[in-house]
């Protein structure tokens, strides 16, 4: 079932609410489980500008002869005050079973000029209202999760927003080995929004007699510096006195983070609560710090530490800034979401 709202006569700008049945499963006592996806997407000039999707399952008990077998209701809401489009799928046989997914978008924060409805002929559909749902006076819009980055390296080639000068693809593990990368977000994390930034990152080169391993900087948030003996966090525009240091009991090794595949210690997570409290998780440890929640964040920059250079270099400064002279790490599965 597809509800396609259009904002121009040529239908180059669309807001789609899409329900797709993925699987039917027969269970005991005649119960049927229906697995489905619910997706909201904004399309401009044939390209998905943004989308959110959830997969869920509704259960249906056996129906009487005159009763619809699998009665599912769809409602669509545009909440202009917060720029939200909200698509709700409800099991009318059990209204506790409900899925809500939506987009926060200013480019589609206006009334559409029309709507097309498409449905699979294998299913019976009844149009109860050809309009957006009317909001009650005390309506409270749900908190929506918005995906800004979902970088998967399942095949060679950089996903949208990702760039590296040094990147080499590992086909066996479907990941990149890099000494540098930049990941730009599709749009900025808004101020005062809860957010999660996650990725797998494993150092694959450690320099003898050098403590530094790599740095990971999130614009307007701060910089994480991995050392052999601990983790440093420096807030954006902070001074040396603002640095938080989490010391490890023993020095790290490459196999701590990658051993025939990423280990659990390679998982980095930054969780901001939208109120200035930040939890950083890495190497199986958590540190709690503070950050400025009044700013937007839109980019991640990674840099390996500088390798020892030859004494005979003509232009030492140039070689210091060359990623081929920085230590390597492996990266995969970069995700950035916010909740508002």
Image (cartoon, rainbow, N blue to C red):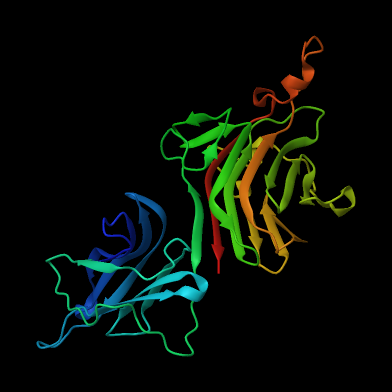
**Lateral position of residue 222 relative to residue 89, left or right:** right
Q: Can residue 268 be seen?
A: no
Please tell me which residue lies in front, 13 or 235: 13
Image location (x, y in percent) of residue 156: 43, 33
Indicate whether 138 appears above or below 247.
Answer: below
Image location (x, y in percent) of residue 276: 73, 66
Residue at the far left in the pictured view: 65
On-image quarter of the C terminus = bottom right
- The quarter holding residue 272 reads bottom right
- The quarter holding residue 24 reads bottom left
On-image quarter of the N terminus = bottom left
Indicate whether 79 appears above or below 181.
Answer: below
Image location (x, y in percent) of residue 223: 73, 47
**Lateral position of residue 217 relative to residue 26, left or right:** right
- The quarter holding residue 288 reads bottom right
Please tell me which residue lies in front, 289 or 164: 164
Indicate whether 247 appears above or below 179.
Answer: below
Image location (x, y in percent) of residue 196: 59, 59
Indicate whether 316 appears above or below 182.
Answer: above
Q: Can residue 55 be seen?
A: yes
Residue at the far bottom in the pictured view: 137
């Amino acid at each position: 079932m597809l509800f396609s709202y259009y904002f121009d006569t040529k239908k180059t700008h669309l807001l789609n609410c899409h329900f797709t049945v993925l699987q039917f499963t027969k269970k005991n006592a005649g119960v049927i489980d229906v697995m489905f996806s619910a997706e909201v997407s904004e399309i401009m000039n044939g390209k998905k500008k943004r989308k959110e999707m959830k997969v869920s399952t509704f259960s249906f008990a056996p129906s009487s002869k005159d009763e619809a077998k699998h009665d599912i209701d769809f409602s669509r809401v545009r909440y202009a005050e917060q720029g939200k489009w909200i698509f709700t799928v409800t099991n009318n046989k059990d209204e506790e079973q409900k899925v809500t997914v939506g987009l926060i978008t200013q480019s589609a924060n206006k009334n559409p000029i029309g709507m097309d409805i498409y449905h699979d002929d294998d299913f019976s559909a009844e149009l109860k209202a050809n309009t957006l749902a009317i909001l009650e006076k005390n309506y409270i819009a749900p908190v929506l999760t918005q995906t800004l980055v979902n970088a998967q390296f399942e095949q060679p080639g950089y996903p949208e927003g990702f760039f590296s000068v040094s990147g080499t693809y590992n086909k066996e593990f479907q990941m990149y080995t890099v000494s540098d990368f930049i990941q730009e977000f599709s749009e900025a994390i808004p101020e005062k929004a809860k957010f999660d930034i996650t990725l797998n990152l494993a150092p694959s080169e450690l320099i003898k007699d050098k403590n530094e391993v790599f740095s990971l900087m999130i614009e307007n948030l701060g910089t994480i510096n991995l050392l052999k003996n601990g983790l440093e966090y420096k807030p954006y525009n902070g001074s040396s006195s603002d640095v938080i240091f989490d010391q490890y009991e023993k020095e790290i090794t490459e196999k701590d983070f990658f051993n025939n595949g990423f280990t659990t210690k390679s998982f980095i997570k930054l969780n901001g609560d939208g109120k200035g409290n930040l939890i950083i998780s890495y190497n199986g440890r958590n540190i709690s710090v503070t950050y400025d929640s009044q700013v937007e964040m839109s980019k991640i920059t990674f840099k390996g530490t500088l390798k020892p250079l030859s004494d005979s270099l003509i232009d030492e400064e140039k070689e210091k800034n060359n990623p081929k002279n920085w230590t390597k790490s492996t990266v995969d599965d970069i995700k950035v979401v916010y909740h508002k």
